[in-house]
């Protein structure tokens, strides 16, 4: 009887420890590029910096295969390779794709997600974050992409090929779905059940002593 109670207690404690654990994944891009959208320009520039400014758009794509549960939070990050940045306000557009490579369809692509206000105090290789939760949570397709645009001077961000440690990244937090009704037990109910089992074990010990 005593060993049985110990096993029950151990199982309940494991469930309590594992309950509701959100998992965060940092996803690296499948591709990034500077897109020269001016007439007569060579559109895609791979292997260089992630550039944003005027007719130059920065595009980056991420695979979503690692996202297997409901998304509770998602952040897009970039970090400067060159300073000072020419424009601290960057417009962010989101799009989906069947290809992990930047292509002609990546230019002028996406729905408007908002304006990214980058801190003026940002340093070389220091990440700045933009909330893309709603877009990532509802996007379909094997890849999602972001098109970055600014009106004035040039911004130089780290790319896959040239960076101070990492390029643009997508940080996604998911909330695992409960596999059964047991993990949905509240912490208070779990503590009460454990206490009752402990009292029962003590009572049984003294009763048969």
Image: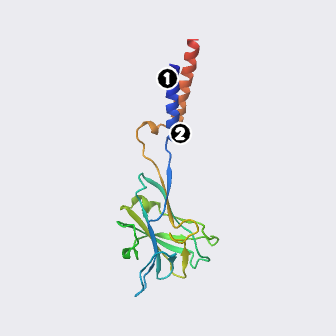
Quadrant of the image occupied by residue 124: bottom right
Q: Residue at x 49, y 41 (%)?
A: 19
At mark 1, the secondary structure is helix
Q: Position of residue 166 (x, y in %)?
A: 54, 65
Q: Residue at x 36, y 67 (%)?
A: 99
Sort mark 1 into few (<14), some (14-19) or many (20+) by Cα contacts within 10 Å.
few
Q: Depth check: 164 or 38 in front?
A: 164
View extreme (right): residue: 121
Sort mark 2 into few (<14), some (14-19) or many (20+) by Cα contacts within 10 Å.
few
At mark 2, the secondary structure is helix
The numbered mark at residue 72 is none
Look at the image and name its color scheme: rainbow
Instruction: Answer above or below: position of 133 versus 23.
Output: below
The answer to which of marks 2 and 1 sits earlier in the sequence is 1
- Can residue 60 be seen here? The reply is no
Q: Which residue is mark 2?
A: 17
Q: Depth check: 112 or 63 in front?
A: 63
- Looking at the image, do the residues carrying marks 2 and 1 touch, with CB atoms under 8 Å apart? no
Q: Quadrant of the C terminus?
A: top right
Q: Which residue is mark 1?
A: 4
Q: Position of residue 5 (x, y in %)?
A: 51, 24
Q: Position of residue 32 (x, y in %)?
A: 46, 71
**Which numbered mark, 2 or 1, is in the foreground of this view?**
1
Q: Position of residue 13 (x, y in %)?
A: 53, 34
Find the distance from the CA under tag 2 to the CA under tag 1: 20 Å
Q: How many marks?
A: 2
- Can residue 142 be seen here? The reply is yes
Q: Residue at x 59, y 14 (%)?
A: 206
Instruction: Answer above or below: position of 122 versus 68.
Output: below
């Amino acid at each position: 009887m005593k060993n049985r109670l110990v096993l029950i207690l151990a199982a309940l404690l494991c469930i309590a420890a594992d309950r509701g654990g959100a998992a965060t994944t940092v996803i690296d891009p499948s591709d990034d590029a500077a897109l020269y959208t001016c007439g007569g320009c060579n559109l895609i520039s791979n292997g260089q910096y992630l550039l944003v400014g005027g007719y130059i758009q920065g595009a980056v794509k991420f695979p979503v295969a690692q996202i297997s549960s409901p998304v509770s939070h998602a952040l897009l990050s970039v970090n400067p390779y060159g300073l000072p940045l020419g424009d601290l306000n960057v417009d962010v557009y989101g799009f989906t794709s069947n290809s992990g490579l930047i292509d002609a369809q990546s230019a002028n692509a996406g729905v408007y997600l908002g304006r990214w206000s980058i801190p003026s105090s940002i340093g070389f290789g220091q990440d700045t974050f933009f909330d893309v939760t709603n877009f990532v949570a509802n996007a379909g397709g094997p890849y999602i992409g972001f098109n970055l645009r600014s009106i004035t001077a040039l911004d130089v961000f780290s790319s896959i090929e040239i960076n101070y440690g990492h390029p643009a990244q997508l940080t996604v937090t998911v909330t695992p779905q409960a596999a059964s009704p047991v993990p949905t037990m509240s912490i208070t109910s779990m503590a009460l059940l454990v206490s009752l089992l402990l009292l029962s074990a003590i009572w049984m010990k003294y009763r048969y002593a």
